[in-house]
Image (cartoon, helix red, strand yellow):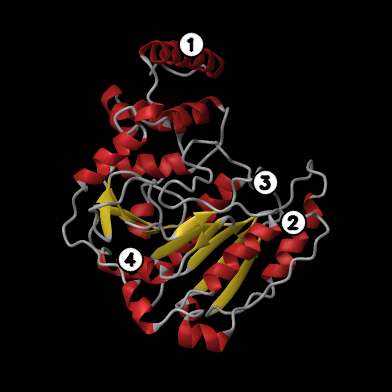
Amino acid sequence: MKSPVVLFIYNRCEHSRRTIEALAADELAYETDLIIYSDGPRETKEGDDAKVRSIRDMAENITGFASVTLIKRDKNMGLAANIEAGVTETVNKYGRVIVLEDDIIVKPGFLRYMNDALDKYENEKRVMEISAYMNPIDTEGLPDAYFIKCGFCWGWATWADRWKYYERDPEKIYKAFSKDDRYHFNTENRRGKWEQVFHNLTGRMKTWAVFWEAAIYLQDGYTLVPRENLITNSGFDGSGEHEFGGRYDAADSSRQGGFAVAETASVNEEISWKAPDEDNKKDTDKGITGEEKREKIIVLPGVIEENAIARTRLHELFAEDQPDILHGIYYGVKETAEYFSWKSRKKLPKI
């Protein structure tokens, strides 16, 4: 049985259409149940009702999958709450889940890679996540797929007995992580992930993915990633709700796995669903020959250990992002001051 795919959509019609069309073109789409969680409109956001109606009209006409289920949220939950609820509901029902957001465009072979890995590592509890994305490091000499001790949210999958460790509790995570934990969680202080935890704690942000990565870290878990990315992200065009603007988030054609930027549909634009050509899809996978199909099969590793070369290259990739000593001191003092200000307002015990 193929894993179900859950897709989270809100009000970006054109982004969602492109994501669904790419997924429907996958050779395993006809064997895949697609479950779509459509977040409700924001009452305070002008034109949101029309956008949400438009995207739901499109979703109700989707074909090309084993089944399509559209779940319409009555009110706006926000991305974090919608994903938490949708992933939990689906993974508890099916035991496993593949997760996409509305701006993740998959490449050929995506579903085969995800399902093969979900099957292979189902009983390997140390493997917490299957990811279709890896930061754009130098891939020379790396195997088809390998393990890294990080987490990703751009096309990913997991199992129910691993998702159970997910908990979006900023205060609990803040208490649970030692100074050494924070150092390693930040890829040896080369990334700013811990800053997200802190901003969720103080209410400046409301995100979910950093808490999934924290769960992976606390379980000493591993994520499987492919050498060549199997997704592109079309969302860094100003239309998204959570765009952090990192140097490796937006389009960068000079690096492996650069991202495509999509044009955004207007509020009144009619978005129609275009199903893939069924005969063409079944026989040739949109012009890909049988030989090329075999080349898409990704060899999965048998030994569960972090790829040391990939870890070193992650360090090199993020080396330019390391703050200087003065910045580090400034941020440390600033975080401490903000934390105690927040704690005094909340009247919480000392951490």
- Residue under pointer 1: 337
**Rounded to the nearest whole Å, what is the CA distance between mark 3 and mark 4?**
32 Å
Q: Which quadrant: the C terminus? A: top left
Residue under pointer 2: 265
Mark 4: which secondary structure?
helix
Q: CA distance from mark 2 to mark 1?
A: 43 Å
SS for callout 1:
helix
Please name the amino acid that badge 3 sits on.
Ser
Which class describes the residues within 10 Å of circle 1: few (<14), some (14-19), or many (20+)?
A: few
Quarter residue 101 falls in: bottom right
* Residue type, numbered disc 1: Ala
The single residue placed furthest to the left in the displayed view is 303
113 shown above or below 88? below
Q: Residue at x 49, y 48 (%)?
A: 253
* Residue with the most extreme front position: 254
**Residues marked 3 and 4 touching at CB (< 8 Å):** no
How far is the residue under mark 3 from the one under mark 1? 33 Å
**Residue at left offset 18%, top offset 50%:** 305
Q: Pointer 3: what residue?
A: 239
Instruction: Evaluate whether residue 172 shows in this view.
Output: no
The residue where tag 4 is placed is 118
* Label 3 Cα neighbours within 10 Å, binned few <14 / some 14-19 / many ≥20: some
User: Does 66 sit left or right of 160 as displayed?
Assistant: right
Mark closer to the chain start, 1 or 4 = 4
Residue 321 drawn at (x, y percent): 40, 28
Above/below status of 2 relative to 322: below
Query: Residue 334, percent across and down?
Result: 48, 13
How far apart are the two marked residues, 2 and 4, measured between alpha carbons?
35 Å
Which mark is first along the chain, 1 or 3?
Answer: 3
